[in-house]
Amino acid sequence: MSALRPHFSLAGLGLGARMALPAFPGFIMFALAFGTAAAQKGLSLGEAMGLSAFVYAGASQMVGLEIWQQVWSPATILTIVTVTAVVNARMILLGATLQPWLRHEPKARAALNLFLITEAGWIIGTRYQNEGGRDVGVLLGAGLTLYVVWFLSTLGGYFVGALVPEPRRFGLDLVMPIFFAVMLVPLWKGARPALPWLVAGLVALLVHAFVPGYLFIIAGALAGVAAGMLIE
Amino acid sequence: MNGFDASIAGPWGAVIAIAGMAAVTYLCRIAGVVVMSRVRITPRIERGLRALPGSIIMATILPVIVDSGIAAVLAIGATIVTMVLARVDLVALAIGLGALSLLRALGL
């Protein structure tokens, strides 16, 4: 089943879909949380689904909700696009490690595969590669499956968020920070690797206190990256 | 206000925002593959990018939590403690939301 050369097969699509199963709970929960938070923020169903369908990057969608406007201006558009770029810059690493695998793929299929790349899909693909697999169909199968799960769960979350009466009473107005706090725990690899997080948080608090708008997200995240580069 | 600004302020604003977000996100997704065939990602750059997810979370939620008051601070604490102990996302999320609604009901 595994060959040394990268190739593509329909059987791989099915295998990828099955390998994506363990990632379902995390995807469903994240998309439910996003859909709920989007409804809370007053996004229309089309806007919430548009974000999940075209941006398809949970962390940036969540952060984007913090910046979302009812009435847009060139400045606020620029802010949300910049914040999105900063949040998703980590995907550069994912793509870089996949390059040898995708090098010989037809351009269109590689483009689709990359559009569907997420951390979870990347982990599935990387594990499969480490076990000797080279079928690019596995990556695409996992990517397509997770995309559908993401889209449908956003839809479900949106209706939960839109239908619950008195959402504040259930704490739903703060579902974004609480969900992010949940996600922070598995990222913990000891105090030293977390030092940049502390820098990021402190810089964000400072900028937030003195500069209006959402610059604090960009400033904090970039300060964290800088700290990460400086700490050996 | 010129025509461009007016259409951004109107119904096209959200469409442009989503399109812009989608475009830069796709650029990030393909950049690794495109860049790798030309330059090397140094260990230093890699360390910086590895620090990014946690940094984004801290930079986004810390100011929001501080602004939201003591109930939010305590609820986030309960969420993190639960997640550390139970390691189940859903349980931690439920405890966090439950703690927040309870604390608010108590008037905090």
Image (cartoon, rainbow, N blue to C red):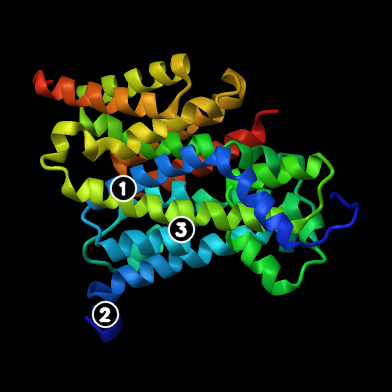
Q: How many other residues sit within 10 Å of disc 3, few (<14), some (14-19) or many (≥20)?
A: some
| Residue A162 in sight in this render | yes
Q: Which mark is residue B7?
A: 2
Say which element carries label 2.
Answer: helix
Q: Is residue A104 left or right of residue A111?
A: right
Question: Which residue is identified by label 1?
Answer: A157
Question: Depth check: A1 or A143 in front?
Answer: A1
Q: Kindly indicate the quadrant of the structure image that contains residue B63.
A: top left
Chain holding disc 1: A
Q: Is residue A6 left or right of residue A223?
A: right
x and y, in percent, of residue B38 in the image: 80, 62
Residue denoted by label 3: A82
Q: CA distance from mark 2 to mark 3?
A: 21 Å
In the displayed structure image, the side of residue B19 where residue A164 appears, left or right: left
Q: Position of residue A180 (x, y in %)?
A: 40, 35
Chain under callout 3: A
Tell me whether marks 3 and 1 sit on the same chain. Answer: yes
| Neighbours of disc 1 within 10 Å: few (<14), some (14-19), many (20+) | many
In the image, is A88 to the left or to the right of A113? left
Work out whether residue B108 or residue B88 is closer to the camera in this orientation and state it: B88
The answer as to whether the residues below labels 1 and 2 share one chain is no
- The residue lying furthest to the top in this view is B85
How many marks on residues? 3
Distance of label 3 from label 1 (alpha carbons): 26 Å
Name the kind of residue labelled 3 in the image.
Thr
Looking at numbered disc 2 in the image, what kind of residue is underneath it?
Answer: Ser
What secondary structure is marked by label 3?
A: helix
Q: Position of residue A60 (x, y in %)?
A: 44, 51
Residue drawn at x 21%, y 62% is A70
Q: Quadrant of residue B46?
A: top right
Q: Select label 3 or label 1 by which is in front.
A: 1
At label 1, the amino acid type is Gly
